[in-house]
Image: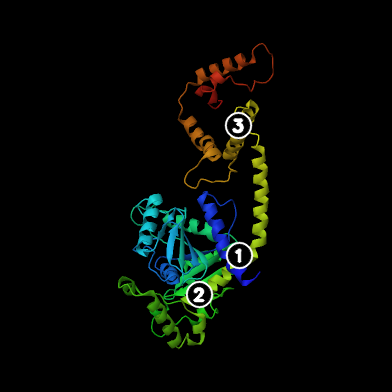
Amino acid sequence: MGNRGMEELIPLVNKLQDAFSSIGQSCHLDLPQIAVVGGQSAGKSSVLENFVGRDFLPRGSGIVTRRPLILQLIFSKTEYAEFLHCKSKKFTDFDEVRQEIEAETDRVTGTNKGISPVPINLRVYSPHVLNLTLIDLPGITKVPVGDQPPDIEYQIKDMILQFISRESSLILAVTPANMDLANSDALKLAKEVDPQGLRTIGVITKLDLMDEGTDARDVLENKLLPLRRGYIGVVNRSQKDIEGKKDIRAALAAERKFFLSHPAYRHMADRMGTPHLQKTLNQQLTNHIRESLPALRSKLQSQLLSLEKEVEEYKNFRPDDPTRKTKALLQMVQQFGVDFEKRIEGSGDQVDTLELSGGARINRIFHERFPFELVKMEFDEKDLRREISYAIKNIHGVRQVSFPSTVIPSSQLGSPNLWAPQL
């Protein structure tokens, strides 16, 4: 495949991603992608804004990213942005892009700092970007704020794991340099799903904020907690720079100067910084897509054949055909039976983690609650024995048998005396 073909790989996957998002499902295809993972205030937003060269992401305290943001960067001579949910509108003012992200987030999650796994698709065209697709995930948090549920930490962790557990996903683990690498939440989560470090790319931010006399040289040289794809260091704008609207291009120039002048990093300055990170991600994602294409193509063809076969059945479809209605009803009843049985046995696809349900609840009632209720019952032993004697004789009818019948009339099922222990 030539260079032109390679460059078109990422836009091709973008089209597939948009198509599946617009119909509200993934068609069970794991598309190659880069998932950005990091704790709150790790510098994820600054890294993405440096890629684009614009301030366009919401900022603030607490959880700011509350829905996954699928960010598609496309090289173009003109600069604008568009959302999948309002594709007809082109945004040239990136302050409006931020406002639209906030509004679309609140539309699904509300304004109480809740989260949702439903992604927002944003496409940015610019002469300052390389073709790249990233998924910005909510920052890892420990303590709920506002009206957030007490298990917000586990909700966010589960959402992140949904994206990074796929073998087709590359993981961009963002960790600030002023934090001990062994305590990095991003690397900890990445290690859970990628223990060998084959899919993980480490990004070390805030190198300029490390204590005087310390550096991250061993980390960046991949000697400490090594990853197959290594680590890349970046220097983002400070909060003061962001509030002062410091130009991102000036910040990138300052970043370059920092690496060239720092005694611990100058020997690897050509392998550090935001431009190198963007170029590396472009190459690695392109190669990753190329490696995944054969399996992806095979799966697509298999699903296409299955869909064509299903469509063929509906070519001569007549809504008033009684046989079709009967078949549909029978299928629904059979499926209900299967689902009910799975619910009772606890073998369904979904497991309730909040309360007992299905067969587990029935089991608890019979083995815990039922014996307790029996002990509480008050009855006269003489009357009970007489009732049991009559019940045994009556259910025998005209038969003469040596053993009591195991059949109990439905009208007697609710009688507490029949369920009382025999004395």
- Which is nearer the eye, 217 or 32? 32
User: Vertical placement of 234 versus 76: above or below?
Assistant: below
| Residue at the extreme top of the image, as rendered | 398
User: In the rendered structure, which amino acid carries the disc numbered 1?
Assistant: Ile
**Callout 2: 10 Å neighbours few (<14), some, many (20+)?**
many
Where does residue 277 sit, x and y in percent of width and height?
A: 50, 74
Residue at the image position 60 percent from the left and 40 percent from the top: 342
- Where is residue 389, by image quadrant? top right
State whether residue 123 is above or below residue 230. above
Decide which of tag 3 and tag 2 comes sooner along the chain: 2
Query: Would you say 38 lies left or right of 168 here?
Result: left
Residue 253 figure quarter: bottom left
Q: Position of residue 304 (x, y in %)?
A: 65, 49
User: Farthest residue in the left direction?
Assistant: 244
The quadrant of the picture occupied by the C terminus is top right
Q: Which residue is mark 3?
A: 333
Query: In the rendered image, which residue does mark 1 sit on?
Result: 289
> What's the CA distance linking mark 1 and mark 3?
43 Å
Q: Amino acid at mark 3?
A: Val
Q: Secondary structure at mark 3?
A: helix
Q: CA distance from mark 3 to mark 2?
A: 55 Å
SS for callout 2:
helix
Instruction: Count how many numbered circles sit on residues in the image.
Output: 3
Mark 1, Cα crowd under 10 Å, few <14 / some 14-19 / many 20+, is many
Q: How many neighbours does mark 3 have within 10 angstroms: few (below 14), some (14-19), or many (20 or more)?
A: few
Q: Earlier in the sequence, mark 1 or mark 2?
A: 2
Residue drawn at point x = 54 percent, y = 53 percent? 19
Callouts 1 and 2 close, C-beta under 8 Å: no
Element type where label 1 sits in the image: helix
